[in-house]
C-alpha cells in the first residue's frame, strides 16, 4: 500500500489485538469498545492477507446490520474498498479479501466455504451458542486453520463462561481477557458511578464489571454446594431408580438414583452423550436392580428408512424396560425445589454435567398469552439432566421396605447403627405409651 493506514485502539484493546493466540475470548462491560475492536480486527486481518474470507457473526442479522455494518463502512478506508454489497452485508477489498456480516439466528446462512477467521460478537446472547460454535462455525475454520475472537458481556455462567475459563487456564490455544467498562479510558468515571447508583447490584456487576453472575431467574436457587458430596457406599437394599431423557439426535441424558431409608434421593451416576442410538446408550447404562423411567415422548412414533419405530421400544429391545415418567413441568419443578430446600437430595460430585445444568437452569423471559396471562417457562437449553431429576422426584420415591435381620450383617457398622436407632425408637414409643 502506498499510504499507511492507521487505527486508534486504547491500551487494553491493543493487548487483545496483538495477541497471537488462535482463540481469543474477550469478556468486557458495556461501552468498553468491543465492536470497535472487532471491526478494526477484521479490516487489518483482511488487508494483511490477500484473498481472505472473514466473518462477523452476531446474535441476529438485524443486530449485525444495525451495529457493525454502519461502523464497518465508516471505519474502512475508501482507498481499499473494491465493492460494497448492501443486500448481503459484504465488502470486497482491492486485494481480493472479503468481509461478510452474518446473523446466528439463521444457521443456514452460516454454512459455506472455509474461513480465515471470524469475530463472534455477544456470544453469550446467541441462542444455542454452544451448538452454533461447535457444530456450525468451528468446522469452517479447519482447512485454513482460521482464528476466532469471541467478544461479549456475560449472561450468567453459560457456554461463554466455559470458553472464558478455557482461556484463563490456557487450554487448547485459548486465551482470555476480562475488562470492566471503566477500563475504557474514554469513559468518564462519573458516568459509571451514576449507572451504579441507578442499577440493581447484580445487574451492574454483570453489565458494567463483566462479572459472570448466576442467572437472576434461577429455577433452583435452593441448590448449593451442600447438596454435592463425595461418592459413598450405597447399601444393596436401597431401591434404585434410573431415568432416560431420550433424543433421536442431540444429547441423551440419564440419571441413576438410590433411595435411602428416609426416602431421600442420592444421585450417584449420570450419562451425557450426543447422537447415540438407543442400543449404544443401553449398553452403557444397564445396571442390575434399577427400575427405569423414560421421557413419555419416547413412545411417539418416529420414521427411519420408511419404517416406523419408537425409542421406548428400541430401549426395550436393548434390554431396558421402562415406565413413563410424569411430565408436569411446573409441578415437578416445585416438588424438586422442595427436595433441595429440605435437603432431601444429595449428588455425587462425579455427576459434573448435572451440577453444571443445575447451576445454569433458569427461566426464560415471561411471555403473555392471548388471554393476557404472563407465563414463565424454563429456558430450553442444556436441561436434559434437570428433566431427568424432575422425573425421578415426580415418581414419588419411597423408603425401601426391608428386614434388617435378613439383609444387614448385625455385626457390621451399619447393622449396629440401625440396631441402636431401632432401640431408641422402641424406647421413645414405650415412654410415650406409658
Image (cartoon, rainbow, N blue to C red):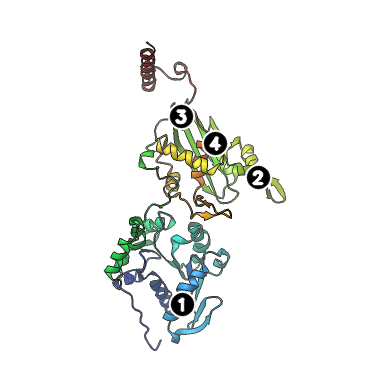
Label number found at residue 140: none
- The residue identified by callout 2 is 300
Of the image marks 3 and 4, the number of the one nearer the N terminus: 3
Residue 380, position as x, y percentages in the image:
52, 51
Label number found at residue 263: 3
- The residue identified by callout 1 is 70
- Going 58% across and 55% down the picture, which residue do you hit? 370
Q: Quadrant of the C terminus?
A: top left
Of the image marks 4 and 1, the number of the one nearer the N terminus: 1
Residue 314, position as x, y percentages in the image:
64, 41
How far apart are the two marked residues, 2 and 1, measured between alpha carbons? 48 Å
Of the image marks 2 and 4, the number of the one nearer the N terminus: 4
Q: How many marks?
A: 4
Q: At numbered mark 3, what does the secondary structure look like: helix, strand or loop?
A: loop
Q: At numbered mark 2, what does the secondary structure look like: helix, strand or loop?
A: loop
**Nearer the viewer's eye, disc 2 or disc 3?**
3
Q: Where is 341 relative to 121, above or below?
A: above
**Nearer the viewer's eye, disc 2 or disc 4?**
2
Quarter of the rendering containing residue 8: bottom left
Amino acid at each position: 500500500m502506498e499510504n499507511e493506514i492507521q487505527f486508534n485502539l486504547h491500551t487494553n484493546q491493543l493487548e487483545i489485538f496483538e495477541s497471537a493466540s488462535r482463540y481469543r475470548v474477550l469478556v468486557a462491560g458495556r461501552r468498553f469498545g468491543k465492536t470497535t475492536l472487532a471491526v478494526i480486527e477484521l479490516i487489518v486481518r483482511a488487508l494483511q492477507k490477500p484473498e481472505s474470507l472473514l466473518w462477523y457473526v452476531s446474535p441476529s442479522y438485524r443486530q449485525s446490520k444495525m451495529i457493525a455494518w454502519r461502523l464497518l463502512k465508516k471505519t474502512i478506508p475508501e482507498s481499499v474498498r473494491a465493492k460494497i454489497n448492501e443486500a448481503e452485508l459484504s465488502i470486497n477489498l482491492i486485494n481480493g479479501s472479503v468481509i461478510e456480516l452474518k446473523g446466528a439466528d439463521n444457521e443456514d446462512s452460516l454454512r459455506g466455504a472455509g474461513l480465515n477467521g471470524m469475530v463472534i460478537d455477544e456470544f453469550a446472547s446467541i441462542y444455542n451458542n454452544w451448538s452454533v460454535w461447535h457444530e456450525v462455525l468451528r468446522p469452517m475454520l479447519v482447512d485454513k486453520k482460521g482464528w476466532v475472537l469471541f467478544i461479549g458481556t456475560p449472561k450468567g455462567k453459560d457456554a461463554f463462561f466455559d470458553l472464558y475459563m478455557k482461556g484463563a487456564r490456557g487450554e487448547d490455544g485459548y486465551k482470555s481477557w476480562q475488562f470492566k467498562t471503566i477500563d475504557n479510558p474514554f469513559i468518564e468515571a462519573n458516568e459509571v458511578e451514576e449507572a451504579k447508583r441507578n442499577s440493581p447490584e447484580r445487574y451492574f456487576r454483570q453489565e458494567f464489571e463483566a462479572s459472570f453472575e448466576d442467572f437472576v431467574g434461577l429455577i433452583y436457587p435452593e441448590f448449593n454446594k451442600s447438596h454435592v458430596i463425595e461418592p459413598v457406599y450405597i447399601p444393596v437394599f436401597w431401591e434404585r431408580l434410573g431415568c432416560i431423557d431420550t433424543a433421536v439426535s442431540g444429547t441423551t441424558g440419564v440419571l441413576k438414583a438410590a433411595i435411602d431409608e428416609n426416602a431421600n434421593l442420592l444421585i450417584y451416576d449420570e450419562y451425557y452423550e450426543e447422537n447415540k442410538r438407543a442400543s449404544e446408550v443401553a449398553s452403557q447404562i444397564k445396571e442390575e436392580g434399577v427400575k427405569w423411567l423414560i421421557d413419555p415422548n419416547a413412545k411417539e412414533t418416529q420414521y427411519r428408512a420408511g419404517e416406523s419405530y419408537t425409542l421406548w421400544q428400541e430401549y426395550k429391545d436393548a434390554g431396558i424396560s421402562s415406565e413413563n415418567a410424569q411430565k408436569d413441568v411446573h409441578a415437578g419443578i416445585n416438588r424438586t425445589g422442595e427436595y433441595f430446600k429440605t435437603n432431601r437430595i444429595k449428588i455425587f460430585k462425579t455427576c459434573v454435567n448435572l451440577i453444571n445444568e443445575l447451576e445454569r437452569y433458569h427461566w426464560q423471559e415471561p411471555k403473555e398469552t392471548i388471554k393476557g396471562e404472563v407465563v414463565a417457562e424454563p429456558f430450553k437449553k442444556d436441561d436434559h439432566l434437570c428433566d431427568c431429576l424432575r422425573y425421578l422426584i415426580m415418581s414419588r420415591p419411597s423408603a425401601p421396605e426391608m428386614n434388617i435381620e435378613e439383609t444387614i450383617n448385625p455385626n457390621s457398622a451399619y447393622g449396629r447403627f440401625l440396631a441402636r436407632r431401632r432401640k431408641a425408637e422402641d424406647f421413645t414409643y414405650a415412654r410415650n405409651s406409658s
